[in-house]
Amino acid sequence: MPWLKIHSIDGWSNRYELLDKEVLIGRLPTCDIQIGHDRQDVSRRHARLREVDGGWQIEDVRSRNHTSVNGEILIPGRPKPLRHGDRIRICSYELYFDEYNQGDSDSGSVCIDDSSSSEAKSSISLAGVGPDDRTRLWFLLEVAQSLRNVLSLDAVLADALSALIRILPSASRSVIGFIDGDDFVPRWWKLRDPGEDQAITVSRTVIDRVVKRREAILIENTMRDLPGTQSIAAMCIRSLMCAPLVDANKEVFGAILVESEATHGFDHDDLVLLASVAVQASLAISFARLHEHALKQKAIEKDLELARDVQSEFLPKTPPTVAGYEFADYYAPARFVGGDYFDYVPLAGGKMAVVLADVEGKGVPAALYVPRMAMETRSCLGESNDPAEAMEMLNRRLSSRFATFVMCVLDPRSHTISICNAGHRQPLLRRCDGSIVPLGESGANYPFGVDDDQTFEAAVFEIQPGESVSILSDGIEDAYNEQRDEYFGIERIESTLQRAGKTAQDLVTTIVEEVRDFAGNNTQIDDMCLVTIRRT
């Protein structure tokens, strides 16, 4: 009576004797074989086995995440005959079809094809267990130990390839390479004859077969099984083995090959040995790549910290002091650095310019533009105290990048504020009665970087005692809630301003806290900047 052996990635395993002529596999407790009861990737009714005419078939019953046999994904509703040793994959579960009731043998999962077709003579799954040969077991142990926690692979993998040449007497060369698009690029190789001078070329037919099957293959006679392959014929390769390198996502990223100039130069045990080495090499390469990525990421973060320090030098450290007025601000980039910019610029006659800008984009490209914007802003305001004229000069000088910009010039003697706006959201005036009024005309001017010749006109407003003007970047308005189905929005900003405390700092703090509560654990997606001016 046939058996089905089941193993999961978390170590769980079981065996089921196929007593009925039809066996349903799935997540439901009503299934004949229940797997993944606490998982959602396994479908409620995932696959079905049937005994037909003395043999067994498997069928995918329109599962969500597919069923595969020996790496081939089944078409739902189309049964596939099963043979002894076939490997069935259902999500994170491996199922082995044991037609001859071999019990709990530790021979592993091995699929042999003894047909005389043009396909590979023999193949094994990566779950194969090494042979009992003591020398080979010691070899695998040495490979595993040498690759453990190795961060530089060049020497170790080259030594492993040399060892393969030594332990496989018929091997003429061994190669490890990576998949790069449609190409296979050799990375490490060893030749039995070190003095042999030949180009390292590998048959793409072999690589494609290994990638497609995700299995190690043995070709005992290349002249018979790979006719017309020029690269193999040119190098007098008569037999070969190839095993895939597989990452944690089960994706093939490379391969290891061993070739021989002798027909039938390798046997099935040699193939098991190579597959075992490939598993160890895959782990070592993946670990080394992660380490390399971590080092690069650390270097990037160090550069970003430096960029953040540079950018911070162009942002105000503390609010200014102006008799009869108070200022408060908040700045938080979505990443290490951001493209929002604000500044306080003292002007002649006791006036104070408050500017806020939002440069297109986020991160380093936008941040690199901020120092230039800061210097040009101060330069233009130094040449002209008139906000409209200063804005026109800025627009011409900053035409290389799209940015919204708002300039507010406070005159504490007349208690007026002159506003010029280049495509930015209107500043919000909070009156003493709590009502909120947008200042200036919405959409009166284009952002910087659209029209070099556009003109600006300042809108002048009086500020009464107790009134405040708040300037915000769109990162506050566009903050998502935790479900990512709603923005914070201008209405929430206005209602928050209405109920906030009296001081400028109260206004800023209340808005920031409301946005944080609204966003919850959601990641900030845009830079946030807020400046408030209040007449005491």
Image (cartoon, rainbow, N blue to C red):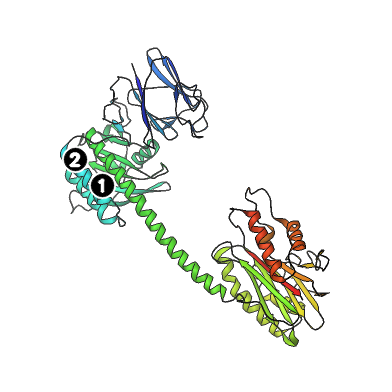
Q: Marks 2 and 1: in contact by CB < 8 Å?
A: no
Query: Which dot marks residue 136?
Result: 2
Q: Nearer the viewer, residue 271 or 311?
A: 311
**Which residue corresponds to mark 1?**
144
Task: Estimate the x, y position of residue 392 in percent, counting from the top left.
Answer: 73, 76
User: Disc 2 residue type?
Assistant: Arg
User: Disc 1 residue type?
Assistant: Ala
**Which residue sits at x=35%, y=38%?**
210
Total number of numbered discs in the rendering: 2
Task: Please say if 189 is above or below 46.
Answer: below
Q: Quadrant of residue 506?
A: bottom right
Closer to viewer: mark 1 or mark 2: 1
Q: Earlier in the sequence, mark 1 or mark 2?
A: 2
* Residue 275 relative to residue 367: left or right: left
Which residue is at the far front?
A: 501
Q: Nearer the viewer, residue 531 or 443?
A: 531
Quadrant including the C terminus: bottom right
